[in-house]
Image: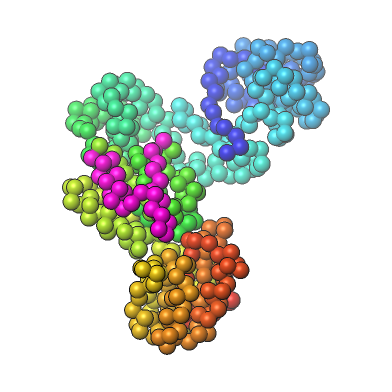
Amino acid sequence: MEIFPISLKLQGQPCLIVGGGHIAYRKAVLLAKAGAVIHVVAPDIEQNLLDIVHSTHGQYHADKFDRQISLSSYRLVIAATNDKAVNQAVFEACEDLNVLVNSVDDPPHCRFMVPAIIDRSPLVVSIATNGASPVLSRQIRTQLEASIPHGMGKLADFSGKWRKAVKEQITNPDERRIFWEDLYASPLKEQVFNDNLIEADRLIEQALTKWQKPKGEVYLVGAGPGDPELLTLKALRLMQQADVVIYDRLVSPAILELCRRDAEKIYVGKARSNHSVPQDGINALLVKYATEGKRVCRLKGGDPFIFGRGGEEIQELFAANITFQVVPGITAASGCSAYAGIPLTHRDYAQSVRFLTGHLKEGSPELPWNELVYENQTLVLYMGLVGLEKICENLISHGQRPNMPVALISKGTTPDQKVVVGTLADIASKVEENHIQAPTLTIIGEVVSLREQLQWQ
């Protein structure tokens, strides 16, 4: 994050605009909406801008900008001229005094940016690109305008009226947040939108009267193979309302960033032979936080029910009488194969697909080898990188062709995705020379040969 978004209270505060034309006028309109007292320095001024200055009880100084002008009394300054030298002089003068300054369409000479704004006062949404693309900011604003009802400002006002009473009755901050979240999902919102405030007051009074400490719940959420855009809508919603997020090694930072920012985040990453928190410990954490009344998101890479030990975890929750939900995710086999351009089934090549775990047990993979050498099937191995050489040897020794195509997909669906193609006979030797790293998915079958034609990433 290159800029820090803040909201400034400018009611009654002096602000200076350098420039008297149309650009200066547009900035003055925004400042006036926020209640600022607007002063202008410019040799000439448009009448509509002068009217705003007078309406906010500011002053117009009919002169060119000079560094002798005292800037320290202004909360912020906007340079809105078409003269880059003047804008730079304004910027440097403000920097010397630590006064916030913006130079319109001149990012290098800005200490703050003026974002694209959606005004549903007191609800205000701002969109900024750090000056990189104001047009993009405006386009996003247009898209959001359609999705934020105009009544949201009324709802914010209504909430403010009740905030003190709710705070006095529900003293725990987490419980209070849940109360408001539940309320906003209730019919109360529509009553406020339609100005039925008497009914809205009745509904919130009723909700406060019936309020009970919320029961804890666990959301077992599949985070998919890595690309945040592959998250389901339900996964995203639950991630953003959880109080605690317990996540694995395979959950990417980009996905974790989508969780509620103030949620407690607990890493329980698992790598081969190195579990930072053993499974019993993870189960205990889920029970502990849910028993405390927290909403817990157990965030797992891929799908929690495909080699994710999700079944074990909800058995523990069931035994402890804890409510839970399971949200499936796109499993690595599906996501990685799609991003690599390898269909797992194809009428001409494979009529079945098998998902297998390649984890070693006592140094060797335990798999039903005789069943894995049939024609017209695709094998997908999770966690098979370390045992890859032994897996290939066993398949060949049980009758599979040495030239059977194999693909290794490392860090699939992410910007770091790497795909290496070979055969059962040579794929193991390609791991080191291509610097293949976990997490890696292995696909074995004739469908791999289609990658050359179908790859799109």
Residue lying at 43% horizontally and 65% vertically, measured from the top left: 383
On screen, residue 181 above or below 16? below
In the image, residue 15 above or below residue 422: above
Q: Quadrant of the C terminus?
A: bottom right
Residue 267 x %, y %: 40, 46
Seen in the image, is 205 located left or right of residue 380?
left
Quadrant where the N terminus lies? top right
Residue 350's image quarter?
bottom left
State whether residue 248 appears in this view.
no
Asked if residue 232 is among those painted magenta in the image, a careful observer would answer: no
Identify which residue is drawn at 50% across, 49% down.
Answer: 254
Q: Kindly identify the residue that appears in the image at 31 percent across and 59 percent down.
A: 309
**Residue 206 image point, x, y percent:** 21, 29
Q: Residue at x 50, y 40 (%)?
A: 145
- Residue range corresponding to the magenta coloring: 262-291
Is residue 269 covered in magenta? yes
**Left or right: residue 198 compared with residue 376:** left
Count of number-bearing discs: 0
